[in-house]
Amino acid sequence: MIRFGQAGRTAIPVPKVMALVLALVFLISGCGRARPGAAPAQPPVVPGQTTQGPDLSGVHVPDFVMPLIHGNVSVPDPKLTPGAVTTTDANAICTIPPHSPAPHVTQAMQAMVYREYGYTSPTAQHKHVMDLLVPYNLGGTAVLANVWPIAVAGTGFYQKDQTNAILRQMVCRRELTLTQAQHALETNWYAAWLRYVVATGHI
């Protein structure tokens, strides 16, 4: 038998104390244990959110709240569209009016691009538009290596257009070199969108 320190308190037998302690340990350890054969817990699926986007391993992106991505992310095949530029001179680029019309992509080139990407049906082609990976007002040119079909729906044309505009502003404000902007688009325009548009609050 044991007693607590102050007189007048009720004595509790040792076996009962041990039984209580063991019961508490069992309850605590059992609460977090999964039932045998139960599937591991999975996060809830967010409607409209893609389950897999472009590979961003090795890409440094600042901390930010990730926006809800609707549909697929449209990215070019780097083997087919590595990008191509005619200049790396920011002074020459920044004298071009921001909304100058891009060089014309001929029907023959469009047909070739669609064929290379496998978009041969009219339905598939209507879901895409021709895009210069490096835009004209960032030194890009309308050659096969710089033209690709970007999706209108999902994360594609509109987000890429935002990225082009923000990168041009940064280049002409001397916040980024023209070479850096071109490289960001050629490497991974989606990562550039996250870094220079989303993370900087431009959406």
Image: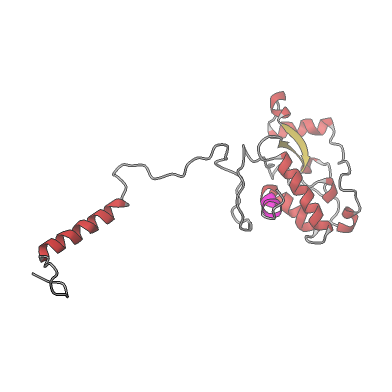
Q: Is residue 139 visible?
A: no
Q: Quadrant of residue 16?
A: bottom left
- Seen from the viewer's position, the closer of residues 70 and 137 is 70
- For image coordinates 76% across by 44% down, the residue present is 161
Please state the horizontal and vertical placement of residue 79, each as a whole percent of the image: 69, 44
Query: Where the N terminus falls, by quadrant?
Result: bottom left
Q: Is 194 contained in the magenta span?
A: yes
Give the prevailing secondary structure in the magenta stretch: helix
Please state the horizontal and vertical placement of residue 70, each as a whole percent of the image: 62, 38
Q: Is 33 contained in the magenta span?
A: no
- Magenta residues span 192-198
When the figure is inspected, residue 17 is found, relative to residue 135, above or below; the finding is below
Q: How did the renderer colour the structure?
A: secondary structure
Q: Is residue 58 left or right of residue 4?
A: right
Q: Is residue 57 left or right of residue 15?
A: right
Q: Is residue 20 left or right of residue 163?
A: left
Q: Residue furthest front?
A: 8
Please state the horizontal and vertical placement of residue 169, each as a whole percent of the image: 81, 54
- Seen from the viewer's position, the closer of residues 113 and 72 is 72
Q: Residue furthest left?
A: 1
